[in-house]
Amino acid sequence: MTSNLDSSHDSYRSIKSSTAPRDRPWVKVALIAVAIAYLTLVLFIPTVNVFFQAFAKGWAPFFANLVEANFLNAVNLTLIIALIVVPINTVFGLCAAWLIARKQFRGRAFVISILDVPFSVSPVVAGLMIVLLYGRNGWFGEFLQQYDLKVIFALPGMVLATAFVTIPFVAREVIPVLEEAGAEQEEAAKTLGANGWQTFWRITLPNIRWGLLYGVLLTNARAMGEFGAVSVVSGNIIGKTQTLPLFVEDAYKQYQTEAAFSAAVLLAMLALVTLVLKEILERKTSIKEVRDEV
């Protein structure tokens, strides 16, 4: 018996020694160096270059570009689209998340897969689908022309395109939070006489607030930064259907590099704010989970 234990121990030591090189310090250092080098090439250097080009001639040209009429129109249109799309997809995401997390029904897996379609479909393809539906020669084109309703190359088409690409974020963030929280508190509230709205506002919403805010944050960031789908359905008409990302592309093509990089800095600052808020929300979520465990 003792000899068998000794032989097993020797075998374990031999296996451990054979895998030891993987744990050598230089392997960890090499992996970190590769990661940093990759991020430097694809993220840090391009980001630094954007800020350098924007401020290459000083602060005055940068601020002059920010008050230019076409730039302000692009910012205004971007904000309008975000103000329309974010509330719509927030309500939809909450409804979809509650249905998926709280109900077991036939086709549930299919509904979850449908939510992920915007992640797997190219935004350009999504824009093309909207054109094929609502364009002049599309399925609903004749009906829209009959009532003089314009969707493509107008605000409605841009809202539809942005709404499509931002559908999953709220639902995908809220579903796991609802599943983890469970339905016990909601059922207890109903037993005590609370109606549906009271249960939602006093029980469900406080439990999911950080996940909901995280989903809204991601939805807003994607809505303001969307390029592919919006470029297809908007026509990129300067001063009319040109959002901020489209303005960057058009200004760069017209050799207005300072204006393009100034707008790019604004989008980069939006991304930075999103990352900071994302980190804050993740920390608050982790703190809440630790408190719940205690």
Image: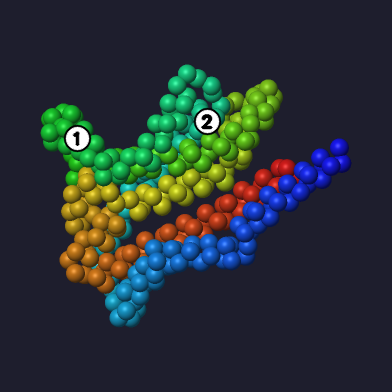
The amino acid on which the numbered mark 1 sits, given as a three-letter code, is Leu
Q: Is residue 280 above or below residue 216?
A: below
| Three-letter amino acid code of the residue under disc 2 | Trp
Mark 1: give few (<14), some (14-19) or many (20+) Cα within 10 Å. some
Query: Residue at left 68%, top 49%?
Result: 15
Camera-side residue of 239 and 279: 279
Which numbered dot is residue 50? none
Mark 2 packing: few (<14 Cα in 10 Å), some, or many (20+)? some
Q: Secondary structure at mark 2?
A: helix
- Is residue 234 toward the left or the right of residue 214 in the image? left
Residue shown at 40% from the left, 44% from the top: 86
Give the image location of residue 258, x and y in percent. Answer: 26, 72
Q: Residue at x 62, y 51 (%)?
A: 284
Residue 171 is situated, as x and y percent measured from the top left of the image, at 48, 37
Question: In the depicted view, which residue is nearer to us: 29 or 112?
Answer: 29
For residue 236, side relative to residue 76 (left or right): left
Q: Is residue 26 visible?
A: yes
Observer able to see residue 189: no
Secondary structure at numbered mark 1: helix
Task: Please determine whether, in this image, residue 169 is positioned above or below residue 179.
Answer: below
What residue sits 35% from the left and 72% below the top? 49
Marking on residue 132: 1
What residue is shown with label 2? Answer: 98
Q: Which residue extends farthest top?
A: 106
Q: Earlier in the sequence, mark 1 or mark 2?
A: 2
